[in-house]
Image (spheres, helix red, strand yellow):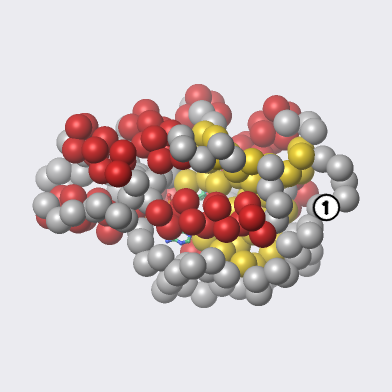
């Protein structure tokens, strides 16, 4: 692990654009550290965070309004000049599929190679995503370690995926939401501005 395939795509002369998709309800330091580590290791020019519009695999649970998740993502990434946020999945409407995310980003960035960053849990589900076979022709996938989940590329196309060890942060959005609901602090699990935003908008209370 670690440096495996870190040079993927180098030499094409194209811009290297990382893509970090997520529901970000709320965004936390696990997401930010993963993106930062991959950006450094893979020499990415930029990482664009893409909050989901309608995460179809989370339809059984309550998900905060897209605008709140978008704004928290903007607040969390604003101070890093390498990070940006895209509204494409929110503005497209309907269920969010990564195949659409990657096609739209490719059309908007024809000067770039795309690198899709995903945690070990999401990577293990990827064969169940819409048009899974086509995903790997649109981006190189980078799976990162996550406490409590095995990181493996079993069954995924050879050369299409890199596995990377990142500092272990046992943080999940679920845990953050539960902590807020119970009145426990989320300071230092999420960026300070996100703590303030959750409070201002009274998110996750009574859940
Ligand atoms: N602590 C973490 N370390 C590494 N990767 C993470 C971590 N938390 C989330 N990710 C990855 O970030 C992406 C977006 O995750 P998501 O927004 O669903 O957060 P989550 O914490 O898994 O949320 P929830 O608990 O609501 O399911 C996924 O690819 C996920 O695997
Ligand atoms: O394309 C799909 O079918 C698909 C199914 C589940 C998740 N995803 C993507 O995986 C990323 C993490 O999703 P989530 O639900 O764990 O926040 C996010 O970018 C989602 O759009 C994509």
Residue drawn 27% across the image and 59% down it: 175
| Whether residue 96 can be seen here | no
Q: Is residue 90 above or below residue 39?
A: above
Is 180 situated above or below 79?
A: below
Q: Position of residue 2 (x, y in %)?
A: 65, 71
Residue 176 in the image: above or below residue 53: below
Q: Quadrant of the N terminus?
A: bottom right
Sort mark 1 into few (<14), some (14-19) or many (20+) by Cα contacts within 10 Å: few
Q: Which residue is mark 1?
A: 10
- 21 displayed left or right of 157: left
The residue at the point 55 percent across, 47 percent down is 20
Q: In the picture, residue 133 is in which quadrant?
A: bottom right
Q: Is residue 144 left or right of residue 78?
A: right
Where in the figure is residue 141, as x and y percent of width and height? 67, 56
* Front one among 128 and 117: 117
Name the secondary structure under disc 1. Answer: loop
State the residue at coordinates (82%, 40%).
Answer: 14
Image quadrant of ligand 1 equals bottom left
Image label count: 1
Res. 65 visible in picture: yes
Measured as percent of width and height from the top left, residue 28 is found at 38, 51
Which percent across, then down, holds residue 161? 70, 62
């Amino acid at each position: 692990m670690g440096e495996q395939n870190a040079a993927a795509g180098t030499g094409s002369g194209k811009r290297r654009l990382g893509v970090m998709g997520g529901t970000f309800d709320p965004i936390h330091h696990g997401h930010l550290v993963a993106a930062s580590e991959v950006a450094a290791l893979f020499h990415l020019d930029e990482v664009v965070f893409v909050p989901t519009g309608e995460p179809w695999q989370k339809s059984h649970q309550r998900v905060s309004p897209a605008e709140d998740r978008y704004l928290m993502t903007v607040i969390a990434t604003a101070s890093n000049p390498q990070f940006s946020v895209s509204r494409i999945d929110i503005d497209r409407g309907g269920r969010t599929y990564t195949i659409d995310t990657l096609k739209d980003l490719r059309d908007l960035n024809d000067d770039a190679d795309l690198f899709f960053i995903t945690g070990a849990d999401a990577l293990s589900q990827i064969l169940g995503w819409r048009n899974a076979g086509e995903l790997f022709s649109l981006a190189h996938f980078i799976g990162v370690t996550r406490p409590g989940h095995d990181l493996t590329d079993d069954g995924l196309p050879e050369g299409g995926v890199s596995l990377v060890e990142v500092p272990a942060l046992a943080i999940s959005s679920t845990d953050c939401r539960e902590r807020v609901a119970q009145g426990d602090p989320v300071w230092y699990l999420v960026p300070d501005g996100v703590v303030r935003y959750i409070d201002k908008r009274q998110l996750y209370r009574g859940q």
